[in-house]
Image: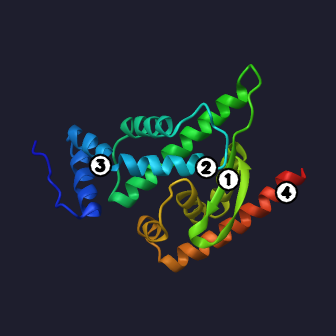
Amino acid sequence: MTNPQPAPGDTMEAMTVLLQAWQQGDAAAFGRIVGAMQSEFMRMARSRLHGHDASSLSRGDIVNEALLKLMQSAPDWQNRSHFFATMSLAMRSVLRDHARARLADKRGGERVRLTLTSAALGEDSMAADLLTLDALLTRLAGDDPRAAQVLELTYFGGLERADIATVLDLSVRTVDRELRFARAWLAEQLDRELEA
C-alpha cells in the first residue's frame, strides 16, 4: 500500500488524505496523524483540564487514552473536523471514566470540578463537576440533540464555530444560536443543581 503524501501547507486536506488512508487500511497513516496533530491534541486536553483539579490525570494521559479508544473503533469520519469531533467525544469519555473512578475510590474519592469558558465568545465561565455536566449533556441530548452536540464540540472538542458548522452541516449563525441556547439551558440546570 502506498503512503499518501499530502500537499505541504494544506493541513485540512493533508489530514483528510491521511484519515482516508487509515480508513482504507493503512495502519501507518494513524501514526502520521498522531505525529502531525500531537500538539493540537495536547491543546485540546489542556482545555479539558482547565479549571479543575485532576492532579492524577495529565494531558498526555487524556490524549493517550482517547487515542486508544479511537484505535479500538472502526475509523468512520469524513474529514479533519469530523475526526476532531470524534476525538472530542473520546476525551469526554476518558474524563468521565476518570471522574467516576475517583468518586468511587475506596479511600474517599471526590468529584472532579470543571470550568467551562469560551473567551472567544466573550462569555463568563461556568463551573460544574464533570459527572453532573455529563448527565446534563445527556439530558440535553434527549431534548435537543443539535444543541447538545454544539455545546459538546465547543467545550469538549475545542472546535471553532466554523468547524462545528462543517461537522454538523449547519450555518455558523445556527451554531451560534444553538450555543447560546445550550449555554443558557446549562446555566439554568446548574443553578437548580446547586439549589438542590
Q: Tell me if label 1 and label 3 are in contact, CB under 8 Å.
A: no
- Look at mark 1 in the image and give the residue it sits on: 115
Query: In the displayed structure, does residue 183 sit left or right of residue 172?
Result: right
Q: Residues within 10 Å of mark 1 (few under 14, many from 20)?
A: some
- Residue 95 in percent (x, y) is at 58, 40
Q: Nearer the viewer, residue 158 or 184?
A: 158
Query: In the displayed structure, does residue 148 sit left or right of residue 87?
Result: right
Q: Tell me if label 4 and label 3 are in contact, CB under 8 Å.
A: no
Between the C-alphas of marks 4 and 3, the distance is 43 Å
Between the C-alphas of marks 4 and 2, the distance is 24 Å
Residue type (three-letter) at the residue carrying disc 2: His
Secondary structure beneath label 3? helix
Which label lies toward us, 1 or 4? Answer: 1
Dot 1 or dot 3: first in sequence order is 3
Dot 4 or dot 3: first in sequence order is 3
Q: Tell me if label 2 and label 3 are in contact, CB under 8 Å.
A: no
Dot 2 or dot 1: first in sequence order is 2
Disc marking residue 29: none
| Rendering colour mode | rainbow
- Residue 106 in percent (x, y) is at 74, 19
- Look at mark 4 in the image and give the residue it sits on: 192
Between the C-alphas of marks 2 and 3, the distance is 23 Å
Residue type (three-letter) at the residue carrying disc 1: Thr
Q: Nearer the viewer, residue 29 or 141?
A: 29
- Look at mark 2 in the image and give the residue it sits on: 50
Secondary structure beneath label 1? strand
Residue depicted at 24% across the width and 64% down the height: 10
Compared with 125, 181 (above or below) is below
Between the C-alphas of marks 1 and 4, the distance is 17 Å
- Look at mark 3 in the image and give the residue it sits on: 36
Dot 4 or dot 2: first in sequence order is 2
